[in-house]
Image (cartoon, helix red, strand yellow):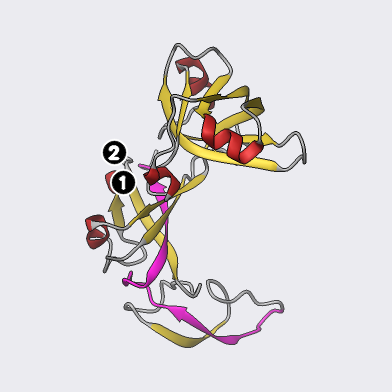
Amino acid sequence: MPDFKIVVNDPEAPKKEKVVKVKVEGDPEIQITDKVKEKLELPVFKVNSKTASEIGAVHGVATIRMWRPDTGDKVKFTGRIIIDDNVPDSVVKVSMEQLINATGQNELEGEIFRARAWQIRINDERTQAITGLKIGDYIDGSIIGLKGVKLAITGGSDISGFPMRPDISGPVKKKVLLSGPPGFHPEEDGERRRKTVRGNTIAPDIVQINTKIVYESK
């Protein structure tokens, strides 16, 4: 079966994050499963209901940002929130294994906020429901664990990195004359180039599918 990476963008997540300062603690009871390691599931974060409410992660997905104390390098985890009111305020518990592997520490200071984007792989019978859909079509979010959510397909790319374009019909790959993205970013006004791109239909050799969460008009 095809192997698709579904990239989810949350357009209502604030561009300027509502950040909560936290202590990130490794918890040996939180396991990193094979599915998490293979990007088929998001890792789990435990927070209490107050911290969850403060970041407003309406879809239960958050990002933790930390800095390695030895190098200063930024480390980010994006995962699924589980509410556990035994966790103290301003504390996030994550897999001990994941935290030590990424930072060399079993606890450190960081910050948590509502995730703006994340990705999940699917490589089973769920791919059949996506193959053949087009840019602009919708996916039921439950296919990747987002119950009650509708995802709009906004684009994608194949294994060679060639992007899908909404104005080219079918599951095709072809060279076309382009004046703008996706597939070409002109450096001068009026510049045009012939580039290889993909059509607007998801084929088995597409590897990344870009989506965004659809919100009802207010």
Q: Quadrant of residue 200?
A: bottom left
Q: Which amino acid does the dot numbered 1 rest on?
A: Gly
Q: Disc 1 designates what residue?
A: 141
Q: Which residues are magenta?
A: 188-216
What residue appears at the point 36 percent right and 73 percent down from the top-left corner?
Answer: 205
Mark identifier at residue 32: none
Q: Up-down: is 211 above or below 161?
A: above
Q: Secondary structure at mark 1?
A: helix
Q: Is residue 51 above or below residue 76?
A: above
Q: CA distance from mark 2 to mark 1?
A: 6 Å
Where is residue 69? Give x, y as percent.
Answer: 75, 33
Q: Label 1: how many residues lie within 10 Å, few (<14), some (14-19) or many (20+)?
A: some
Amino acid identity at mark 2 = Lys
Q: Residues within 10 Å of mark 2 (few under 14, many from 20)?
A: few
x, y percentage for residue 194?
Answer: 55, 88
Residue named by callout 2: 147
Q: Residue at x 45, y 72 (%)?
A: 159
For the C terminus, which image quadrant? top left
Is 26 covered by the magenta stretch? no
Indicate the position of residue 211 as horizontal and vertical percent values: 41, 55
Residue 180: % across, % down: 57, 75
Q: Quadrant of residue 135?
A: bottom left
The magenta stretch spans residue 197? yes
